[in-house]
Amino acid sequence: MGQRFSRISGWGRYAPAQILTNDDIAEIVDTSDEWITSRTGIRERRIAEPHETTLTMAQTASERALAVAGIPADNLDLIIVATSSPDYLLPPVSSMLQHALGASRAAAFELRAGCTGFLYGLSTAHQFLATGTYRRALVVGVELISRAVDWQDRNTCVLFGDGAGAVVLEATERPTGVLGFVLGSDGAGAEALIVPGGGSRQPLSSTVLAERGQFIHMDGQAVFKFAVRTMGRALLEAVECSGLQLDDIDLFVPHQANQRILELAARQCGIPWEKMYVNIARYGNTSAASIPIALSEAVEEGRLQEGNHIAMVSFGAGLTWGALALRWGEGPATTEEVFGRQPLHLPQRVLRSARTSVQKVRIQTTSRLSPLLLPLYAMSRRVRKEEKTGE
Ligand code: COA
């Protein structure tokens, strides 16, 4: 068997119809459209209606992805569902999805890695395909997070939204699709983003409910700093282990948690803003669903063409992080074409590796300086805003 690759052949998303704007939230907790927009970039989010569940959202996104791929569900060998808001602790929503889709031959499991879950899922599915174990996998990121959010806590309830995204990954002999990835975890930060109650450590009880322990608790600043520390580094590592340079990437599809985090990451890596796909204003943070939702919108908007290179990057509860680079499309016949260039001559190689080293130093330095940079950045934004509004 020759070398195997895995490519995305189908994509789909689902977002509940119900829109909750910042002004709507300002009627529930002490906040304002101005605060939420300037601190996060979020203007509105989608909220599931009572009859909707994690399963129904995942099913709709999956059926759309299967339709694009043009394969029936019973051709799937594997289903991975990344979520932190499953319908039940048991059974896993992945098996319920497998049944609902009629994917009778598929193995199915649920994967929990916070907002990084989709990239963990995509990397895992890629392994099964690259080794020749399976030929077709469905990877889903889905969150019905509005039911895990404390609607009395303005620190968290303004951030999150519901949604689902799915991709079909198919094995191919052509050199395309997933080129490389990095995954990471730092459990030292576990308590920065936590639902303390409802698990085996603190089963649901009247005390847990009284302390609102069934909801998400977050140290926003700690998560913000972690994101700034890890995103740029993970991106560069994933791109480098794919045999590419950041300049080779046509579109960056980052986890949509906070527009300020994305602006900092772009600045840190020297990525032009036009290359970042950002839709946070319309969805908020949909956790494990945010990257597949963004990817499917980017394709529909014509932002991806055969041969383009994409890099995705995420961070989230755990704390976890991940980044993955891939080549879009069916793929060329030969390996040389996959990187869109001939083998480099020595002077070019020296130049490229020098550029990578400079990028690395820049990212390492700004990561180390991030505790200093963040307050400066916040201050400069405030000053700019005050200048604009003439206050
Ligand atoms: N509306 C109005 N004021 C709010 C508010 C809200 N929704 N939420 C917090 N505040 C207040 C705080 O109480 C605080 O007031 P104080 O100065 O009187 O104490 C002030 O705003 C500043 O709070 P702070 O936490 O410093 O704001 P911030 O600039 O760090 O922004 C987050 C808060 C949550 C937007 C930001 O930290 C963040 O995005 N962190 C990352 C979170 C994340 O991505 N989580 C998911 C990971 S996958």
Image (spheres, grey):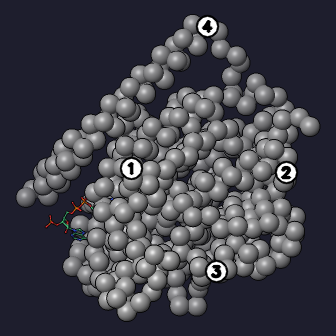
Q: Earlier in the sequence, mark 1 or mark 4?
A: 1
Q: Position of residue 224 (x, y in %)?
A: 33, 54
* Residue wearing tag 3: 90
Q: Residues within 10 Å of mark 2 (few under 14, many from 20)?
A: few
Image quarter (top left, top right, bottom left or bottom right) of the N terminus: top right
Tell me which corner region of the image, top left, top right, bottom left or bottom right, holds residue 118.
bottom right
Tell me if label 2 and label 3 are in contact, CB under 8 Å: no
Q: Which residue is identified by label 1? A: 227
Ligand 1 has an atom within 8 Å of the beta carbon of the residue at disc 1? yes
Q: Earlier in the sequence, mark 4 or mark 3?
A: 3
Label 4 is placed on what type of residue?
Leu
* Label disc, if present, on residue 346 of the rendered structure: 4
Q: Is residue 52 above or below residue 370?
A: below
Q: Nearer the viewer, residue 387 or 368?
A: 368
Residue at 57%, 68% (x, y): give it.
83
Q: Badge 1: few (under 14), some or many (20 or more) residues near its Cα, within 10 Å?
A: many
Mark 4, residues whose alpha carbon is within 10 Å: few (<14), some, or many (≥20)? few
The x, y position of residue 378, in whole percent, is 21, 50
Between 103 and 295, the one nearer to me in the picture = 103
Q: Secondary structure at mark 4?
A: helix
Q: Quadrant of ligand 1?
A: bottom left
